[in-house]
Structure formats: C-alpha cells, structure tokens
C-alpha cells in the first residue's frame, strides 16, 4: 500500500490534513520571533491583534490547539463547582476528553442539539440552576459554529445573546470553523462574533495552517486566560514561526473557503445523482448516508481508488473538502463513489 500522504491519495477525512503551502512555509521561515511567554514575539502579537480586529474583540491569545483554547476559555469563565451548558454532540463536551471536568472541576450540562445544530433556548433557560446550595452554579452557554458543517442562523445567535443578557450566563463560541460560517452567510466575521463574550477560532482546519488556534475576548478576560494557558502547558516561546502561518492563512485562505464549499456542493450533487442519500452541505462537510449500503465494501472500494474518507460512523461517511482538494481530486472522488454504485456495489 502506498504511503498515506502521497499525492496519489485524495484525503477527504478532514480539513485538518492540509499541509502548509510553499508560500506559507516561506512566511514561517521569514517570521520575526521572540519569547512569547514574556510577550516578546512580534508575530504572535500581530496575529492576536489582527484576528481580534477582524472579530471586533479587544484581545486574542494564540494557543497550540482548539482543544486547549476551548479549555482555557472554560477554565477562565468557570471555577470549580460551576457548570457550562453545551450541546450533547458538541466538540467541547464530546471530543475534548472531558477536559473541563477532568482539569477544572467544571460540570457540563449537556442538552440535545436541534436539527440546525443549536440548542433549544427554552431548554437552555430551563436548565439554568437556581442560586441554591444543591446546585452547581450555571455560568456559561457554549455554542459551536459551524457545527457538523452547518451554520447557525444569525437570528438564532441574537436570540441566544438576548437570553444570556437576561441571565448571569456568559456566551462562548467554539468557532473552530467560524470563517466557514461567515463565508457561507456572506457576512463579516464580526456579524457572528459580536454576539459572543469569547470566541475560539482554529487556524489549522480549512485555513490550512499546520498548528494553532486563537482565543478572543475582552482584554481583562484574555489577561486571566494567559495564566490558564501557562497552567495548561500552552505558553510557547518563539512561536512566531507558527503564528506567521496563521497570519498568512488569514490573508490568503479565508475567501477561498468558498471554493471548498462549492466543491462540497458539487460532490454532493454528483452523489445524489448517483443514488446516494445525503443532505446538501452548507459549508465544506458532507455526510453520506450508508445505512442501506454495504459499508465495508464501500470502504474497501474507496481505499482501492485511493480515496480517504471518515468511515467511522455507523450510519454515515463524512467527507470534507479543503485546501488540498482541487477539482481533479474532487473528480476522482466523485467517480469512485459513482462506479461503486454502478458496478462495485456488493462485489
Ligand atoms: C477541530 C475542532 C476543535 C479543536 O480541535 P484541535 O484539534 O484541538 O485543534 C474544536 N471544536 C471543533 C468544532 C473542531 O472541529
């Protein structure tokens, strides 16, 4: 079997698999650096400042991963014995190792997610605990956008903001792919982020940087978050080389997310025409239903055709378009699925 990363493969497992472009590597090579734990890395500062500006936030904090950025946000918003309200399928709750509980003594209050990926705000309100020694203190509502490739409507964000303003809750956004949401809505990043107290944004997904996320929020919050980042082991030294990749991505890889969305739609249309069952993607992620198909054969077929897909789910395969999937790669993927239906099925 060829190496997993040879260009022979079309890798649709995730937008995390992107590799830095030559231009990005050049920007990393040229970056001016300093010790960021001492606040002396000019490129990290520039990245934090630039992204904070784009999001209309006071300050930013560069971290190695989105998991750490969300964790630091939770640790800064909530203390031991506090709770945060979160979606049952949300990344922070389900895919981050229970970090808030394990490391922060923060109790999650998970709620079912609606079809569009939000939480029912009446249920959120009903789950807020009274100020009584029987209960954890409800501190924070955490939303995700995009969530499984879906975009939360701006109207919903406003409703969520209105709810938290009537309560003691703060509002955090796991915005790992929030640029995909802004591109899909054809709005500014700020039109989304303005509803939130704090936002975490990944540079290492569709934006194509090798490493890094930025937590954004009020200056005083980010000051406290800096302490928690150090506690979590996220204080990095000459990290300007990494921040340079993020800056390059913000300049060159945001508008092109529209290409990923277009390719995801094209792929979805081809698959629907070929007889697959799926919802039209809103951004760069599509889920192909496989409950009526021979999943193992399909997985083998894709592998034989050098297509990598996330076949882990029982009912669906996840396909993600990204920077390293061009029209030729998309064509190969579409054909592999089409031929599976027309000739491969069950063989
Ligand atoms: C990828 C992702 C994160 C953070 O993941 P890391 O791999 O730790 O950078 C957080 N939330 C969502 C929704 C994600 O997709």
Image (cartoon, rainbow, N blue to C red):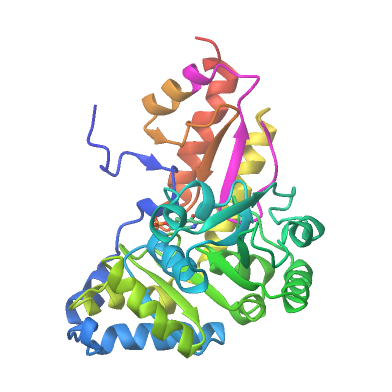
Taking the image as drawn, is residue 142 in sight? no
Q: Is residue 296 above or below residue 110?
A: above
In this view, which residue lies farthest toward the front?
Answer: 133
Image quarter of residue 154: bottom right
- Residue at image position (34%, 88%) is 46
- Residue at image position (23%, 86%) is 41
**x, y percent for residue 74:** 49, 66
Q: Is residue 193 above or below residue 41?
A: above
In this view, which residue lies farthest toward the top?
Answer: 347
**x, y percent for residue 268:** 63, 42
The one nearer the camera, 265 or 69, is 69
* In this picture, residue 233 sits left or right of residue 260: left
Task: Specify whether residue 209 is painted magenta.
Answer: no
Image quarter of residue 107: bottom right
**x, y percent for residue 28:** 23, 75
Taking the image as drawn, is residue 286 in sight? yes
The one nearer the camera, 233 or 287, is 233
* In this picture, residue 200 sits left or right of residue 188: left
The one nearer the camera, 231 or 237, is 231
Q: Report the image quarter containing ligand 1.
A: bottom left
Task: Specify whether residue 288 is painted magenta.
Answer: yes
- Residue at image position (53%, 31%) is 313
Quadrant occupied by the N terminus? top left
**x, y percent for residue 51:** 46, 82
Please state the extent of the stretch shown in magenta in the rendering: 277-298
């Amino acid at each position: 079997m060829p190496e997993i990363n040879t260009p022979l493969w079309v890798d649709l497992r995730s937008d995390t698999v992107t590799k830095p472009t030559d231009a990005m590597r050049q920007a990393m090579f040229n970056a001016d650096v300093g010790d960021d734990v001492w606040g002396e890395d000019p490129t990290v500062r520039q990245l934090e400042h630039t992204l904070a500006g784009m999001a209309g936030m006071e300050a930013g904090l560069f971290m190695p991963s989105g998991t750490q950025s969300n964790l630091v946000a939770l640790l800064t918003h909530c203390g031991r014995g506090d709770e945060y309200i979160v979606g049952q399928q949300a990344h922070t709750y389900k895919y981050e190792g229970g970090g808030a509980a394990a490391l922060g003594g923060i109790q999650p209050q998970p709620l079912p997610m609606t079809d569009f990926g939000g939480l029912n705000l009446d249920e959120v309100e009903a789950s807020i605990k009274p100020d009584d020694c029987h209960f954890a203190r409800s501190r924070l509502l955490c939303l995700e956008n995009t969530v499984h490739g879906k975009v939360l409507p701006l109207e919903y964000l406003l409703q969520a903001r209105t709810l938290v303003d009537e309560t003691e809750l703060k509002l955090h956004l796991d915005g790992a792919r929030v640029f995909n949401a802004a591109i899909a809505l054809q709005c500014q990043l700020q039109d989304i982020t303005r509803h939130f107290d704090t936002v975490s944004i990944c540079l290492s997904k569709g934006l194509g940087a090798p490493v890094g996320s930025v937590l954004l929020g009020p200056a005083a919050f980010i000051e406290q978050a800096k302490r928690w980042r150090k506690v979590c082991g996220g204080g990095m030294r000459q990290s300007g080389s990494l921040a340079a990749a993020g800056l390059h991505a913000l300049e060159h890889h945001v508008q092109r997310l529209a290409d990923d969305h277009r390719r995801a739609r094209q792929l979805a249309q081809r698959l629907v025409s070929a007889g697959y069952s799926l919802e039209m993607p809103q951004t760069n992620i599509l889920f192909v239903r496989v409950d009526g198909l021979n999943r193992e054969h399909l997985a083998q077929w894709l592998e034989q055709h050098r297509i990598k897909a996330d076949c882990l789910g029982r009912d669906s395969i996840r396909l993600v378009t990204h920077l390293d999937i061009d029209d030729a790669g998309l064509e190969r993927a579409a054909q592999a699925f089409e031929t599976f239906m027309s000739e491969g099925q069950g063989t």
